[in-house]
Image (spheres, rainbow, N blue to C red):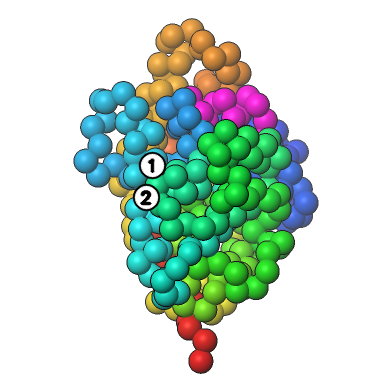
Amino acid sequence: MTTTTAAQVDPAIYAKSGDISKHLEGVKQQYDTQNKIEFYKQVMGDGTANIHFGKWDNVDLETEGAYGKASEQMTDYMFDLVSGLCECGEGDFKYVDLGSGTGAAALRLVKMHPHIKHATCLNLCDEQNALATKEAADAGLTSRIEVITGTYEDAPLEDNTYDACFSQDAFVHAFEKKQAFKEAFRVTKPGGAFVWCDLMCGSGEGVSDEELQTFAATNMVNDWLSPEENVAACEAVGWKDVKFVDLTADIRISFQLMLKKVEKILADGNPAGIDEKLLTSYKTNLGNRITQVDRGVFKWGVVHAKKPTAN
């Protein structure tokens, strides 16, 4: 049986504990250190803070900056999708990014779309939020981008505020998915829409429950749901017209490109000074992940939904 971890981990932190405080601390440890921020910047962001998996349609894998282009293409695809689902009428558009990371998606979208009046970035990690705040200020966008520290399962946001809720590669870490979906529903206006993407539990032939749970426990996944279960959880809290778009083939390419980048960083002598143990661990784990995609250990894709209009 093949298992994998996201990186070399401390079992005292990275484990499925059932304790939300410990879980949130583990998520911070996975992302919110300068070493991790630099790692993701180099391996996923092509030197930028846009550290998301990519959508690879018409992207030349051999072109410099290919991963960054695919990441941005995924952001654009999701925003176009959620914008098309909204029934909020004409006028200024407000949306919230739940689990916004370094704020790269919001920065890109606000720059590209003048009709976005306001984007709220809600995120758990202090270091990422400091970077997002600085990038918004440097871009002259502080009047249109707000960065808030908090969790999307207890969002410090008013009811019926946003035309859309957006989340890119963050909900995998929800302590309880249904609660996260409920909060997104609460803060979205009637007629608004919801779009999110992330890893989900697979159902490949020959994949054991133990393997699925091992992956979850070592990647800060407390509530490991399949696409069908995620759709049902969204419906249970009130979302309508809930659909899953399977993009698992794209994440396989993302893992391949990430592995190639890690190998190049190591071959070049690690000029950014990233922790060597982290790099060598990821080199092994990314190879395992490509195999796991093929075996159906997990899926990756988009879930989108609409909030009914008020009667």
> What separation in Å lies between label 1 and label 2 (alpha carbons)?
6 Å
Q: Residue at x 55, y 54 (%)?
A: 119
Residue under label 1, please give it: 72
Nearest the camera: 306 or 96? 96
Give neighbour class at mark 2: few <14, some 14-19, many 20+ (Cα, 10 Å). Answer: some
The disc placed on residue 76 is 2
* x and y percentages locating residue 18 in the rendered image: 73, 56
Of the residues shown, which amino acid type is indicated by label 1? Glu
* x and y percentages locating residue 84 in the rendered image: 35, 66
Vertical position of residue 302 compared to residue 39: above or below? below
Nearest the camera: 107 or 168? 107
Side (left or right) of 7 relative to 59: right
* Residue 207 in sight here: no
Question: Are circles 1 and 2 on residues that touch, CB within 8 Å?
Answer: yes
Q: How many marks?
A: 2
Q: Residue at x 58, y 13 (%)?
A: 273
Nearest the camera: 9 or 38? 38
The disc placed on residue 127 is none
Query: What is the magenta segment's predominant secondary structure?
Result: helix
* Residue 94 in sight here: yes
For residue 119: magenta? no
Question: Based on the displayed image, in which of its 4 quarters is residue 197 positioned?
Answer: bottom left
Vertical position of residue 243 compared to residue 250: above or below? below
Of the residues shown, which amino acid type is indicated by label 2? Asp
Question: Based on the displayed image, in which of its 4 quarters is residue 288 positioned?
Answer: top left
**For the magenta stretch, what is the residue range?**
30-43
In the picture as drawn, the residue positioned furthest to the bottom comes out as: 311
Q: Residue at x 48, y 64 (%)?
A: 92
Side (left or right) of 58 relative to 290: left
* x and y percentages locating residue 167 in the rendered image: 51, 55
* x and y percentages locating residue 68 in the rendered image: 39, 34
